[in-house]
Amino acid sequence: MHIFTAEMISKICNGFVEGDPKVALREFGTINNAQAHQLTFFSNVKYKDYLYASEAGAILINEDFVLEQTIKPTLIRVKNAYLALSQIMSYYDKLMNPLKNIKENPHFIHDTAILEDNIYVGAFTYIGLESKIHKNTQIYPQVFIGDQVEIGENCIIYAGVKICKGSKIGNYCIINAGTVIGSDGFGFTQDELGNHAKIPQLGKVIIEDYVEIGANVTIDRGTIDNTVIKKGVKIDNLVQIAHNVVLGNHTLIAAQTGISGSTKIGNNCTIGGQVGIGGHLEISDHLTIGAKSGITKSVNAPHTIVAGFPFMPFKEWTKSNVLLKKLPDLNEKINALEKKLAALESKCP
Amino acid sequence: MHIFTAEMISKICNGFVEGDPKVALREFGTINNAQAHQLTFFSNVKYKDYLYASEAGAILINEDFVLEQTIKPTLIRVKNAYLALSQIMSYYDKLMNPLKNIKENPHFIHDTAILEDNIYVGAFTYIGLESKIHKNTQIYPQVFIGDQVEIGENCIIYAGVKICKGSKIGNYCIINAGTVIGSDGFGFTQDELGNHAKIPQLGKVIIEDYVEIGANVTIDRGTIDNTVIKKGVKIDNLVQIAHNVVLGNHTLIAAQTGISGSTKIGNNCTIGGQVGIGGHLEISDHLTIGAKSGITKSVNAPHTIVAGFPFMPFKEWTKSNVLLKKLPDLNEKINALEKKLAALESKCP
Amino acid sequence: MHIFTAEMISKICNGFVEGDPKVALREFGTINNAQAHQLTFFSNVKYKDYLYASEAGAILINEDFVLEQTIKPTLIRVKNAYLALSQIMSYYDKLMNPLKNIKENPHFIHDTAILEDNIYVGAFTYIGLESKIHKNTQIYPQVFIGDQVEIGENCIIYAGVKICKGSKIGNYCIINAGTVIGSDGFGFTQDELGNHAKIPQLGKVIIEDYVEIGANVTIDRGTIDNTVIKKGVKIDNLVQIAHNVVLGNHTLIAAQTGISGSTKIGNNCTIGGQVGIGGHLEISDHLTIGAKSGITKSVNAPHTIVAGFPFMPFKEWTKSNVLLKKLPDLNEKINALEKKLAALESKCP
């Protein structure tokens, strides 16, 4: 296990030390239970009580946070404690998981495939005809890379990912285990006998740079045009992206959400978990969609939040929710009104 | 890349050419952006403007569609442009992806397994004890076929599919990557100590002919009887089919839907995405279920649509949805009525 | 195929025979269609008609059930017919699927990995650096076990499961095919340029004894602390467990449910299918959550049921659901009231 001093850490994240710069740190901990050999961080004032009671070795903390009590751990003052933590963790992660440059046996690499330098190929990984893997990419065991696939540089493809024929992956992408890229879309038409006839899916999946995809996600290839996941998109586990979908730059999609065929999502959207979005829709940039919403129409409303099924502006949804719980009350009020009104009508005929 | 002329294409789909029969086509394109070397199709009048502006090499178009303007591309007139497109795409797909008849190394095929002629077995695929694979079936790399499994002829089993012990797959089936067939059902009973005791799952999964299953789907084996997926069923990605479920012929199930244990779904149903169907229910033939619905009771209503949670006839659901958005209005109206009525009561005592 | 007599079965489950103790049984069947060579069970009086018409070889039946008609099959009387069935099925299952003690070729086991006695390692399985597998554990083909993973004794890890770096699995656990343990959590922060910067996920997944996990489930590793699945938890297919979640002892989670980051679920909870639970929440012991619910706040209500989105006590939810279907009626009533009141107001000015 590597050991860092508070001083070393302050240099990595461009901060300065208050307290003992020599304190030795071997692990990360959270503010509520970090111990003397651990580095933790403080960024949410909700946890202030934990801060003052902390037994941590050192704490990353914002420059401008004013202590109200004395404190035992060494402080490492930084502009943004959470971002600094992330930087230190990345540094540590790279140290602990250096790039591998080996091809574990057995593997299957087609004669016509091209692998650049400094690539890890785990055992039981398959790389098909005319595929190309760029430098520094790490491909874990049991990955399937079909024919004519291209994967950029500095990617991590975890165990058991399947990337089907013709897909293109950009640089600096991460794909978690079990995910399927380039499965056939769900496309059928009726033949003369009324049976479902398969529409072959001949398009591709194009994934741009800096995309991260969770575990057991499914992304279907396009029917004729391509399914496109643009730069910086982040997709959580068990998400379904249907054929011909286009996801705009830097959009975030939480777990178990499904996007139906041919829908175009704008840039910088944030989509909650278990959302369903219908087919052939257009969603504008900078839209936030609440968890479990059902989106049945195109939405052009940048910098707003919609939620619910039927979906509506977030504020209306919260009002509607309150009243949904009060429906029995409303019903009783209506019944009472009817009785009173009838009584009054009989008095004033 | 293969090159077709408009004339060759018209012969494949039994159409006739208007314009240059020699125009050379190398790819497919969509009506809004097809180029001179591409074949496209026109079937939805919504896209009429794209039709007249099209730069495509040739367009598949319905026989009875009357042009209102002159047009640059060659036309290939057919009965049903969309179906014809599907036929041409299938033709092309088979040309580009001919059946393979190789066994890539390494693979694991148990001595007692029987493989008929003209079968592709990808590297790292496992075929267990006494399993049988019929002719012309293509099994991609990293597939798991457990003991005593039978797979019919002309199937495509994509990379990393797992087909567990005793499952039977019919002819002309397609199973997309990462799908699990024959996992244990979720069955527990309480033992004497109140703990969850596993009920062993000893049934099988039976899949009939012409079934297509998406990526990362899960289909549990039966507990005692079998889980049965009948002829022509099409299942989209990330769908969950629990133990003992029976799906009727030609039923369609969109992505992320879940069907609970022992439920029987009729023939020719269409089930939207993210639907949940409870256990031990019966759903009649020809029912359509809207996306995100929750079905908690058996439904016997052929040729109708239900939607919502609670589910209701589609028309009622759309009305209910409109009012759900207006709940704050309704609430205000009730409050106003109460005030006015109170005022009136004090006037007419 | 093994053959049992009714007498042998009665001894396994501590029951007694009424009828022919020598009847030969080769399979299990369900009460509605079991045949002469099959053992079935009767525990739900709803199926009484099937009981009296049964052609089964023998029937497991509760000691205290009083027959109202004569019956053809042999009866095996037990305290709890369903539990006895489960015991017999387990007995049969172990007989049919004895523990394997082989390592199929090819496999990849790192030199530093430690495997105890009586372990099955299927072909194409990968076991990484310093991992440890305890005795009697069965690891099917194509499993990925990353570095520094520990798996307890008597576990079954089905085909294609991926268990990522540092995860710990207890004893007597079952993990169904395609499941991913230890994928990266969905954690990002904004860097100085406003881009999503990945927060490295350095925690682990800890799974205690007697946990059963379905197929194609995803369980993310913790960010700093661990994701913890406690003793006896049962998780159905396609469930998502985000980073830092803690699931209490013996909690059940049905298919396609998702639990967001850092949420703590109590002991002995029962969570329906397609439920979504928000992040950073606390759910008390012994809570039942209805299918498709959305839980947006912490809930401290042992031995109650909540349901809906917005969630509410189960009884209120059923009332609210009835009224949801009647919203058009309520709306009409309000309109009628308004008219009548206006009429009355004009009369009594």
Image: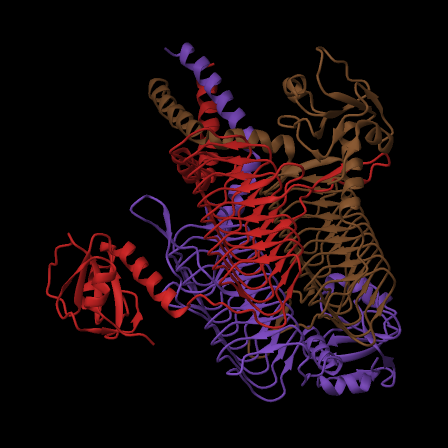
Chain colours: A red, B brown, C purple
Residue A12 locus on image (x, y percent): 25, 61
Residue B195 rendering spot, x and y as whole percentages: 55, 75
Q: Quadrant of the N terminus of chain B?
A: top right
Q: Is residue C228 visible?
A: yes
Work out which quarter of the rendered image holds the C terminus of chain B and state it: top left
Q: Is residue C2 above or below residue A117?
A: below
In the rendered image, residue B5, in percent from the top left (x then y), is placed at 80, 30
* Res. A348 visible in picture: no
Residue at 48% x, 17% y is C340
* Left or right position of C303 against C28: left
Q: Does residue B237 appear to the left or right of A100 in the view shown? A: right
Q: Quadrant of residue A301?
A: top left
- Which of C66/A311 is in front? A311
Q: Is residue C314 above or below residue A53?
A: above
Q: How many marks?
A: 0
Along the line of sight, which residue is nearer the eye, B202 or A149? A149
In this picture, residue C207 sits left or right of residue C118: left
The image quadrant of residue C101 is bottom right
Residue A235 pos. (x, y %): 49, 49
Name the residue located 65 percent from the left edge and 81 percent from the top edge.
C120
Residue at image position (51%, 27%) is C331
